[in-house]
Amino acid sequence: MSAADTKHKAHIEVTGLTMAYGDTLIQRDLTFTVNRGDIFIVMGGSGCGKSTLLKHLIGLLQPAAGEICYNGVSYFDASARQQDDMRRSWGTTFQTGGLFSAMTLAENVALPLQQNTQLSKAEIADLVHYKLALVGLAGFQNYYPSQISGGMQKRAGLARAIALDPEVLFFDEPSAGLDPLSSKLLDELIVQIQQTTGATIVVVTHELASIFAIGNNSVFLDPESKTMLDCGHPQRLKTDSPHHQVRNFLARGKLSRGQLAHDQTDNSHREKTP
Ligand SMILES: Nc1ncnc2c1ncn2[C@@H]1O[C@H](COP(=O)(O)OP(=O)(O)OP(=O)(O)O)[C@@H](O)[C@H]1O
Ligand SMILES: [Mg+2]
């Protein structure tokens, strides 16, 4: 990374992004910035398009309109080589895709290193050991995914995602299916990884505890109007968003009917119409 890049506070800039599957519009007119070092939350109700947005951010799906820039370079306008470089600087864990079940944890974490670097076997073994230790799995390198708990599997997935020291990490529902304690530990691990690596982290989640525990920036996608309603620090959105849907979501649906009705009248001139 050049000195100029590190001064570039905006890391990922999404401008006028519209996403669709064929003729089916999922979200339109998304414009927001993820700053370097953010833990940025993509939030919104089930089915609003959070995973779809993540797939656009990592170049798996092509926008119907708009632009996604990394360090000022538009991913979809970049050359194949630039795109390869960009992809190599990202680490991902998917909502459904997990670890390879026929491989040990060490083999799972080693895979991206074998595929993307010229490191020797011994160097890879050292790095795998280090990454597994970083996520609290020292000593488990020879276990298969089925032999460890769900929380440990998530952490092993994280170790694989950070294998190549990514500049950006993408997590889709990292704590889905975990008990509250494992989920809290995973949140703490995500914050720790951000602090130790300085990576920019984009997390898709609708878990309120996680949103407030780890997020310093966010975007809220609305399934009804099919666009974003707000972006910014989740704590600020909880109290100050002009959109009752956002405040209601962040208050666990506890806004009173009176507040909602009042806001609907109040905000009708401010909100975007579908
Ligand atoms: N490959 C696809 N082809 C067509 N439609 C799809 C495809 N993938 C997702 N969708 C639809 O797009 C919409 C958004 O899906 P997406 O998975 O992005 O939502 P989400 O916000 O991640 O939901 P969840 O909270 O349940 O994970 C849904 O209506 C879904 O059915
Ligand atoms: Mg999803």
Image (cartoon, rainbow, N blue to C red):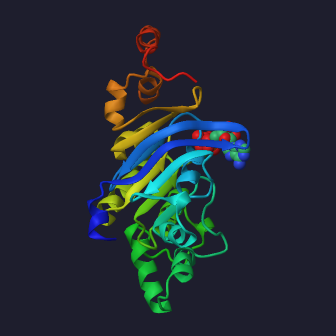
Instruction: Examine the rendered structure and indicate whether residue 9 appears above or below residue 135.
Output: above
Nearest the viewer among 188 and 137 is 188
Instruction: Examine the rendered structure and indicate whether residue 155 appears above or below residue 222.
Output: below
Residue 11 shows in the view: yes
Q: Residue 185: x and y, percent? A: 40, 53
Ligand 1 quarter of the rendering: top right
Q: Residue at x 62, y 66 (%)?
A: 146
**Dividing the image into 4 quarters, which one contains the N terminus?**
bottom left
Residue 186 shows in the view: no
Q: Residue at x 50, y 77 (%)?
A: 141
Q: Residue 9: x and y, percent? A: 30, 54
Q: Residue 136: x and y, percent? A: 40, 67
Q: Quadrant of residue 273?
A: top right
Is 64 left, or right, of 43 in this rendering? right
Q: Residue at x 57, y 74 (%)?
A: 108
Q: Residue 237: x and y, percent? A: 36, 30
**Dividing the image into 4 quarters, which one contains the C terminus?**
top right
Q: Residue at x 36, y 45 (%)?
A: 215
Q: Quadrant of residue 165?
A: bottom left
Nearest the viewer among 135 and 86 is 86
Q: Number of marks in the image?
A: 0
Instruction: Examine the rendered structure and indicate whether residue 256 appears above or below residue 25.
Output: above
Nearest the viewer among 263 and 24 is 24
